[in-house]
Image (tube, coloured by chain):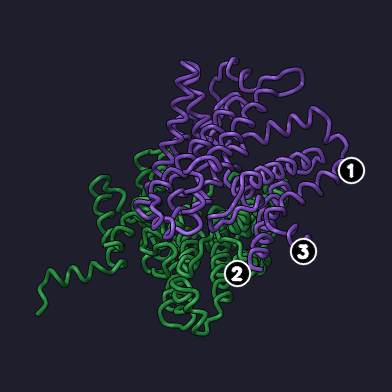
Chain colours: A purple, B green
């Protein structure tokens, strides 16, 4: 009984969902485990993991970032113009843009005390507008060498995306669990007043969280640039709900202060596996929209119910 | 005798007064930049579009005053816009039943939002964001990629009608709804409950208010008014189109915020939102006159929301 109650704790919910899914899959859809499909899955999971990790850090401090999708789109749009001139310049300016967006979000939410929903909703609209100015419709040119480096294959193993995935996980792990800043994130999210009394600079900690989130979103944009080999003003659209959903499914409390990197990883894998299965089953894309919304609502509702007990 | 300047300052403390002053200022600026913008013909067009956004914004105001947020409104408008045409099939006899069905569907969506927020305790933003993913999926599934049915001639006729040439029918509908909600919010106990729940749910609960019911009701109102707006849009345009740009979600939030209803504080007013809506639509209209593309209008909309919220939060902080 004790074991059961321990297993039903929120951070295991995602794990069991995934386990159940995987077992069902191996019986019902053997082609899921084909090498080609697994590498497809990985290719899809990388950008979501990037965005979700940033989103999780903001949610840890009881904030939220609705501008991640717009940041991602903007990144691909900038890349589609700048990469022709110089790839390092493009990468640097995109990462800088992501951090700047985060800084603005953070200043608005923390210093001007604008509610983070409203603030990031506003910046999201501004960024979408800017993106439409510089790249009104999908297009632009991305150098082959960039695409081939990011999406490098070794035989049928996508080593490039795999490398990025590991890199993001290692950076995330280091940031959350090996730095004082990571501890501060949990402290501020858990009890802001206590954190302040313990000598933590709460404002800086929160603003930094938004900057990290913007950085990760623009990193995901750099990856998506390689995948679509162009700039697309609409490519980031689905990432807002997906990232919040993946973080919530991974057991991070939306009220802040609690959440793990592994939970978020599980959430991301579940989201990627689900959309992969839908595609394998040839589910109509519109049904996929409906299911995705239902899953997010269902899972968040379920984890909130657990919370109350 | 209170000095004049103090009295002015006291009046300026009232958000609604400030909003209407801003609206007046806006019209003057518009007149200076482009005299045509304040002509009756143009103002009539601004009012027509204000009435669709404004109907959505009234619902959004109620939700925001009650302490929530509804980002599914734009997609409710879209769903009803598609569904309304599909169900009406260009038949006059079906116009009224379809209107009620649409309002029912809008209310139903609001009910689901409300239940998710209260009983399942899903944060409003996640609940309504999830809903706004589901709804266009349903609209596309229903239509199967092509626009079905059509608007009944009588609906087209009524929605495109203008009273005395310059007052669009939809504006009358909007103002009547606004008036009704001004009275509800100011004069009824239900109205007081929305404010009470928004400013302090625990206190409201302790004084015997059924908090969950009030919150659910606010989402139902928002859903129904969004559906009504979708119907007005359908009637005015005269046909449904799957290519739909959602200006209503951010637009309604902008109207609420500009109208002096800050988020998550349980204060604000419908009167303010009415002026806020006209400000947003007039600005939009002005930007179109200067041939600023959609991209520029999105930037302006986002900047206004951020600036106004920052301004109010500074004013409150003082």
Q: Name the residue under label 3.
A: A2
Q: On the picture, is A205 further left or further right than A288?
A: left
Q: Can you identify the residue that label 2 sits on?
A: B118
Q: Residues within 10 Å of mark 1 (few under 14, many from 20)?
A: few
Query: Which chain is home to disc 3?
Result: A
Among the two numbered marks 3 and 1 on one chain, the one whose residue lies closer to the N terminus: 3
How far is the residue under mark 3 from the one under mark 2? Answer: 30 Å
Which label number is shown at residue A28? 1
Packing grade of label 2 (10 A; few <14, some 14-19, many >=20) is some
Position of residue B276 measured from the top left corner of the image (x, y, whole percent): 37, 60
Alpha-carbon neighbours of circle 3 within 10 Å: few (<14), some, or many (≥20)?
few
Quarter of the image for residue B295 reads top left
Q: In this view, does A237 lie to the left or right of B278?
A: right
Gap between marks 2 and 1, in whole Å?
A: 37 Å
Secondary structure at numbered mark 3: helix
**Residue sitting at 26 percent across and 48 percent down?**
B35
Tell me what residue is drawn at x 49 percent, y 55 percent. Answer: A189
Instruction: Tell which of B189 and B210 is nearer to you.
Output: B210
Residue A96: x percent and y percent? Answer: 43, 31
Q: Who is closer to the viewer here, B265 or B8?
A: B265
């Amino acid at each position: 009984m004790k074991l059961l109650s321990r297993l039903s704790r929120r951070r295991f919910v995602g794990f069991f969902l995934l386990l159940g899914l995987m077992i069902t899959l191996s019986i019902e859809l053997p082609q899921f485990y084909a090498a080609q499909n697994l590498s497809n899955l990985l290719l899809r999971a990388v950008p979501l993991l990037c965005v979700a990790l940033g989103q999780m850090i903001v949610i840890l401090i009881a904030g939220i970032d609705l501008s991640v999708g717009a940041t991602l789109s903007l990144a691909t749009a900038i890349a589609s113009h700048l990469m022709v001139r110089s790839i390092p310049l493009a990468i640097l300016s995109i990462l800088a843009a992501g951090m700047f967006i985060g800084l603005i979000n953070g200043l608005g939410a923390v210093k001007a005390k604008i509610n983070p929903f409203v603030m990031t909703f506003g910046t999201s609209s501004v960024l979408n507008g800017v993106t439409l100015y510089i790249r009104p419709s999908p297009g632009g040119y991305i150098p082959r060498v960039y695409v081939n480096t990011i999406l490098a294959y070794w035989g049928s193993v996508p080593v490039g995306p795999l490398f990025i995935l590991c890199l993001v996980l290692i950076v995330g792990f280091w940031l959350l669990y090996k730095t004082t800043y990571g501890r501060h994130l949990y402290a501020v999210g858990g009890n802001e007043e206590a954190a302040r009394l313990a000598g933590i600079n709460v404002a800086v900690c929160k603003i930094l969280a938004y900057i990290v989130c913007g950085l990760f979103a623009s990193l995901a944009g750099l990856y998506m640039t390689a995948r679509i080999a162009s700039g697309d003003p609409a490519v980031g659209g689905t990432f807002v709900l997906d990232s919040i959903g993946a973080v919530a499914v991974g057991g991070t409390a939306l009220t802040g202060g609690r959440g793990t990197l592994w939970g978020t990883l599980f959430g991301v894998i579940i989201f990627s596996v689900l959309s992969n299965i839908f595609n394998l089953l040839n589910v109509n894309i519109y049904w996929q929209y409906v299911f995705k919304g239902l899953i997010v609502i269902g899972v968040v509702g379920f984890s909130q119910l657990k919370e109350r007990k | 005798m209170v000095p004049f300047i103090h009295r002015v300052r006291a009046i300026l403390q009232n958000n609604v007064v400030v909003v209407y002053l801003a609206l007046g200022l806006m019209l003057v600026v518009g007149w200076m930049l482009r005299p045509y913008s304040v002509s009756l013909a143009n103002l009539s067009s601004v009012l027509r579009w204000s009435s669709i956004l404004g109907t959505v914004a009234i619902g959004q105001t109620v939700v925001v005053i009650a302490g929530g947020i509804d980002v599914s409104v734009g997609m409710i408008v879209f769903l009803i816009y598609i569904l309304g045409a599909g169900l009406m099939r260009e038949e006059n006899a079906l116009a009224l039943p379809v209107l009620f069905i649409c309002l029912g569907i809008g209310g139903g969506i609001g009910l689901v939002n409300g239940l998710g927020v209260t009983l399942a305790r899903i944060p409003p933003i996640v609940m309504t964001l999830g809903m706004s993913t589901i709804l266009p999926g349903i609209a596309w599934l229903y239509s199967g990629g092509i626009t079905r049915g059509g608007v009944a001639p009588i609906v087209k006729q009524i929605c495109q009608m203008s009273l005395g040439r310059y007052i669009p029918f939809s504006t009358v509908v909007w103002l009547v709804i606004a008036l009704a909600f001004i009275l509800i919010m100011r004069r009824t106990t239900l109205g007081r409950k929305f404010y009470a729940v928004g400013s302090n749910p625990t206190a409201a609960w302790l004084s015997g208010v059924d908090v969950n019911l009030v919150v659910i009701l606010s989402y139902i109102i928002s859903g129904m008014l969004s559906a009504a707006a979708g119907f007005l849009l359908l009637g005015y345009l005269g046909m449904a189109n799957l290519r739909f740009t959602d200006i209503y979600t951010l637009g309604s939030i902008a109207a609420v915020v500009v109208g002096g209803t800050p988020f998550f504080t349980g204060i604000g007013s419908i009167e303010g939102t009415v002026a806020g809506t006209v400000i947003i639509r007039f600005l939009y209209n002005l930007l179109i006159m200067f041939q600023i593309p959609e991209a520029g209008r999105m930037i302006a909309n986002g900047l206004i929301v951020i600036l106004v919220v920052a301004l109010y939060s500074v004013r409150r902080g003082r």
